[in-house]
Amino acid sequence: MSTTALTRVVTYRLSEEQGELLDESAAGVGNTANAQAREVLLNHLSSQLKMTAQEQLLFEEICKIRYTLGRGFSLLAAGQLSIEAMKQLNNDVDSQMNAITKAVLTKRNNSGR
């Protein structure tokens, strides 16, 4: 089995409480604190969704459509759907696009999808 040479060193400081949490976490799985921190970091990095600029744009548009449809149906069900309400919804979606996209990504990452 071939191994990759590990040449990059990362150091950081933790509070006493954070250090204790790391030690407990490591002991719970039979790791050293260093090995546990490395494993958690690598798991986190590998779980991040990486998209090209085009994929990101497409994803944002899908999130916009999803959010707009959901809110639109809510307005319809409540008997509050109007042209003015939809104009306001579109303005809200445009101004909150980053937050909406981030919320969807966070929800997907946390659900393991």
Image (tube, helix red, strand yellow):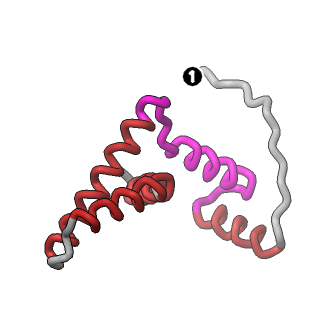
Q: Main secondary structure of the magenta part?
A: helix
Quadrant of res 69:
bottom left
Where is residue 18 shown, x and y percent of the image?
75, 70
Up/down of 52 relative to 61, above or below:
above
Residue lying at the far top in this picture: please name it.
2
Magenta stretch encompasses residue 27 = no
- Say which quadrant the N terminus sits in: top right
Q: With respect to residue 53, does 33 lie above or below?
A: below
Percent x, y of residue 3? 64, 25
Q: Position of residue 104 (x, y in %)?
A: 40, 56
Left or right of 101? Residue 7 is right
- Classify 10 Å Cα crowding around label 1: few (below 14), some (14-19), many (20 and above): few
Residue under numbered circle 1: 1
| 50 and 56: which is toward the camera | 56
| Between 59 and 26, the one nearer to me in the picture | 59
Check the image and name the residue furthest to the front: 84
Residue sitting at 15 percent across and 77 percent down? 79
- How many numbered discs sit on the rendered protein? 1
Assign a secondary structure to mark 1.
Answer: loop
Give left or right: position of 113 versus 75.
right
Would you place residue 47 above or below residue 79 in this image? above
What span is in magenta? 29-55
Say whether residue 64 is left or right of residue 80: right
**x and y percent of residue 24 in the render?**
67, 70
Given the image, on which type of amino acid does mark 1 rest? Met
Residue at image point 45% right, 37% down: 56
Residue that appears at 71% across and 56% down? 32
From the viewer's side, name the closer residue of 49 and 6.
49
Task: Residue at 70%, 71% (x, y): give it.
Answer: 21
| Quadrant in the rendering for residue 54 | top left
